[in-house]
Image (cartoon, helix red, strand yellow):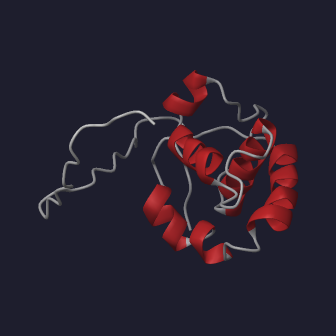
Amino acid sequence: GAKTGTPVALRFDPNAKVVITRYTNLPAAPYTAAQAQRGEQVYNSTCASCHQNEKFIGKEFVVNWGDRRVGDFYQLVRQTMPVDNPGSLKDQQYLDVTAYILKANHAPATTDSLSADTTIMRGRKIGVHP
């Protein structure tokens, strides 16, 4: 195998903080009712076996994700789920699940689809409320 350098001990900084940026000035992410309906089916068949609804529907989700960029949530889900095979769903299925989560948290449906377009993902927020 390849030779590596001397191991470096990891250092824990007790003063480190995670900064979560809220984007209250961005418009809410769009999604269609059809996307949310498909997303509910994917959620129920793939996600619900591990995730209880209270993590993604209601106050806890709104507190953790409200006014954050929709792309941050989408990328997290796409890169880490399902836990036993991350990234194994089709891109449209990840978009549809995201749309379902928006709908379940009372974000209104629109005539525009949620898409993986960078402008949408970076320029729209998760506009939800309990």
Give the camera-side residue of 52 and 6.
6
Query: Horizontal and vertical percent for residue 11?
Result: 16, 56
Q: Is residue 120 visible?
A: yes
Residue occupying the point 44% across, 65% down: 63
Instruction: Please say if 58 is above or below 2.
Output: below
Residue occupying the point 57% across, 32% down: 121
Residue occupying the point 58% across, 71% down: 55
Give the quarter of the figure containing the C terminus.
Answer: bottom right
Residue 119 in the figure: left or right of residue 109? left
Instruction: Please say if 70 is above or below 12.
Output: above
Query: Horizontal and vertical percent for residue 74?
Result: 60, 44
Instruction: Please say if 93 is above or below 44.
Output: above
For residue 116, what is the image quadrant? top right
Give the camera-side residue of 38 and 90.
90
Residue occupying the point 56% across, 56% down: 128
Residue 71 in the figure: left or right of residue 8? right
Instruction: Please say if 38 is above or below 26.
Output: below
Query: Horizontal and vertical percent for residue 84?
Result: 70, 61
For residue 90, what is the image quadrant? top right
Query: Horizontal and vertical percent for residue 27?
Result: 52, 35
Residue 25 in the figure: left or right of residue 126? left
Please state the total of marks drawn on the protein image. Answer: 0
Residue 17 in the figure: left or right of residue 24? left
Q: Is residue 109 visible?
A: no
